[in-house]
Image (spheres, rainbow, N blue to C red):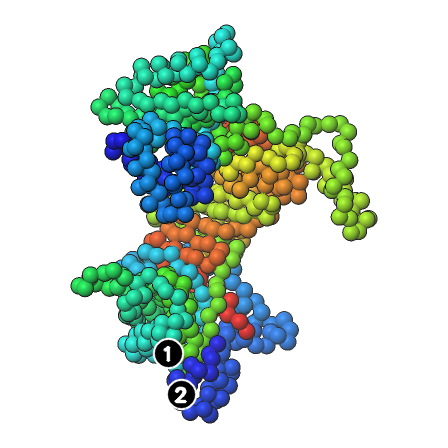
Amino acid sequence: MESPQNSVARTPSNSAIVQRRSKSKSYRQSYRSCLGAASRLGLTPGLTARRLNSSRRALKSQVITEKVNPEHLAILVKAEWQLSYVTPLYQFRHTQLKSYSRQLSAFIAAEKQQGLAVEVEGSQSSFRVSFSVVQGMAETDDDAETVLIQIFSKPMFAKQDEPQRSVWSGWLTCINGNPDYLHSLPKGFTCLPLFGSSGAEVLTSLVKSWFQQTFDCCFGCLEINQTSLQWLAALWTNCHTESSLKHLKMIWTIPVVPPLQVTYTVDPQDAWELWMSVRMDQLDKSEEEEEEQARNIDIEEVTRFMQGLKSHFYRHFRLDLSAGNLQQVSTALGSAKFSGKIKISSSRYIITTLALLTECALLKMPI
Amino acid sequence: MDDAARRLLQRLVRRIPAQTLKTTLDKWGRLKAAQRQSMDFTQSKWALTEKLLAICEENELTLKHIAELEMIHVIENPDRSMWYALQLMDPEDDAHSVELTQFKEQFKSHLSELVRHVSIKIKKHTDEAVWIRIAWGDSFSRPNHLKPTYVVHHLQTPYVFVTGLTSKLKLLLTQALVLSTRHQAIKDASLSGRKLTAIRDLLMRQYQQVFPTKYPSPLAESNQNATNPLIDKEQAELSANRHQMACEAFGSGMLPQLQSAVYKLETKFRDHMNKTMTEREEPLKCVVKFASTSLLESLRHCASSGIASTPVTPLLSSIPLKGRNYFVITDNGPGPSSQTRQPQN
C-alpha cells in the first residue's frame, strides 16, 4: 500500500493525493472479480471458471532458444525463483523500461539513504538496475511481453575495474493468460500476474514496493498448492521419453509429533510406465476423441497417477500419504515447492510450466 | 611440535565451543596448574590457539598428545558425524573372554601388520565402551591425523560403531576387528545415524519396550482429557488399542533418536484399479526415506493416531525389531542383499 509521503514525492499537490488514493481503490482489478462478478449472487458459470483448469495440454517441448534471447533464457533456467502474484499494473509501458531502470535505481538509493534497507552484500557501492523485455515468451497476442529486471552491484571489496555482478533478478510474466479476463481489463492496465524473484529478500521487497507505488498494484505470496504440484509431477513425467527425468522425487510431510518427512523417489522409467498405463486406460474409453485426448491431459489422469503411487506406498507401509501434505516435487526437468519456489531446469518446457503458474497467479489474486 | 601437530591443535581449538574448551582442557590434564590459570577463555579463538601452541611447545607435547585431546572432545561430543553400525558374527569359543588389555594389544598388532603407517589410540570410556582412534597413512605417507576414523566397541557384544571410515580402509579395519575380538566374520548392520547413543541403545535394546499382551493394561493417561464422555467412550477402546499396538511395535516412553530410515523397494506394482501395471513383469523401483528428528517417535505417533494402520507393518516395525534403518525389499524373499521379506497383503 502506498503511504502519503511517497505520493507526495511523486505528486506535489495535496489534492492530487486524495484523488490518487481513491482511484487506486477502484482500479484494482482481479481475475475473480471479473469472471465471478455475477457469481457472488449465486451459482453461475463464473464460479467454475475460477477453478484451476481441469484439463491442459501436455508440456510441449519447444525449441525456444531461437525465439528467445539465449542470455535471457540462461537467467531464467539458472535460478530457483520465489513466486508471487501481482495485480494488473496501471500505466505500465514496455517502451518506458529505460526510465523505469533509472527510477528504480534512484528508489533503491533513496531507501538506502533513509536506512530503511538492511545492509545487503555489496551495499557499499551503488546499485544499477536494468529492465529488459524478454521477447518471444508470450504465447498469445493477449499476453503482455515478459519483463526481466536485474540489479547489479559491485562486491564490497572489489577492485576499481572489476565489473558489477548481478545480485538480484526477477521477472514478471503472463503466459496463456485467460483471454476473457485479459479483455475485461479497463484501458491502461497491463496484466503480468506472475512475479519471480531470486536474490536478497531486502531487494525483493524494495522492488515490490516500488512497483506498488509506481503502478498501483499489489503483490501476494503464491504457494504452489497440492493440485499444481501434482500437475507438475504428471506433466514432467509425461516428457520422460523426450528428455530424461532422472528421477521423480516427491516429499510429503506427515503431521505427527515430531513431524515426519517422507521422501518418495521413483525410478523414471517406472514412473513413466505407470503414467502411460493411467493414460492408456483413459484413451481406450474415448476412442472417438483420440486425437484430442492424446494431446490433452486430464486432471483425472493426474489424480489416478498420484493415487497409483500412493497405493503402492500404502501397500508396503500401511501409511496413508493423503494424511500428509505434498511439499515438493522434483525431477531433472525442474523442481517445485509448496512454499512457492520453482526451478525450471530445461528451457524446452519453460513456456508450458509458466502457463500453469500464470493460471495459479491469476486465481490467487484477491477479489 | 611439528607442523602436523600445530595444524591439528589449531583445528581442534576452532572446533571446540568456547564454553567447553576449559573443561576439555582440564580433562586432558596436560597443562600445569599455573598454565591453566594463565589462560583467559574470554579471548578470541585465535588468541587462545596462539597461547595453547606456546604452552604445548613449552611442555614439549607432541602429536600424540594433541590426538588425545581430540579424542576427549569426540568422546564427549559424539553426535557430530554419521555413525555406522557393524555386527560381528560367528564368535569363536573364547570370544567372550576377550578383555581390554588383550584386545588392545591384538588390535594394534593386527592393524599395524595390515597397514604400514598407522597411528592407533585406544581409550576406555566410563560406560564400558572402548574408543579407538585411527589415523591412517599408507606405505609412502605418514598417518593423516586430520581425517581420523573413530571406532566404538563394547567388549563382549557383537556391535561396533564407526565414523569417518572410507570404503577403502573398511576392509583393513574389519579384518583387524574380527581377529582381535575372536570372531569369524563381520557384516554391515544397516543402521546409521548421527546420534551414537541412539543407535547403540536401539541395537542393545536399551529403551522401554512393550510386549504384546492378551489383557491390555488400562491406559490411564489416554482418558484424562475427556470432553465428551459418550464419544470418548466409543473411541477410547479403538484408540487404546491403536496406542497399545503402536507401543508394541516401537516401544514406549523416550525412544532412541533415529533420524532416518531408507527402504529400497523393488516390488511388483499391484492395484486392482490398474491392470496394465499389475500385469507388468518388472518390479517398480523406488526409494522411500522417512526422516524426522526422532523417527521412532514419529512413527509411533503415526500408528497411534491412525495415520498408519495398525497392526504396524513389519517393514516399519523391523526398524526397532531388527535394529536397522536401511532395507532392500524385493518380492522374492531374502536375496543376496535383501533381508526383509515383503508382506503379501
Q: Which mark is residue A92?
A: 1
Extreme left residue here?
A161
Residues indicated by labels 1 and 2 sit on the same polypeptide chain: yes
Which of these two is toward me, A83 or A246?
Answer: A83
Q: Amino acid at mark 1?
A: Phe
Picture coordinates of residue A210, whole percent (x, y): 39, 75
Extreme front residue here?
B34
Residue that label 2 marks: A11
Q: Secondary structure at mark 2?
A: loop
Q: CA distance from mark 1 to mark 2?
A: 17 Å
Q: Secondary structure at mark 1?
A: loop
Q: Amino acid at mark 2?
A: Thr
Picture quarter containing residue B305?
top right
Quadrant placement of the C terminus of chain A: bottom right
Picture coordinates of residue B194, whole percent (x, y): 47, 36
Extreme right residue here?
B230
Which of these two is toward me, A304 or B201?
Answer: B201
Is residue B217 depicted above or below A10 in this figure? above
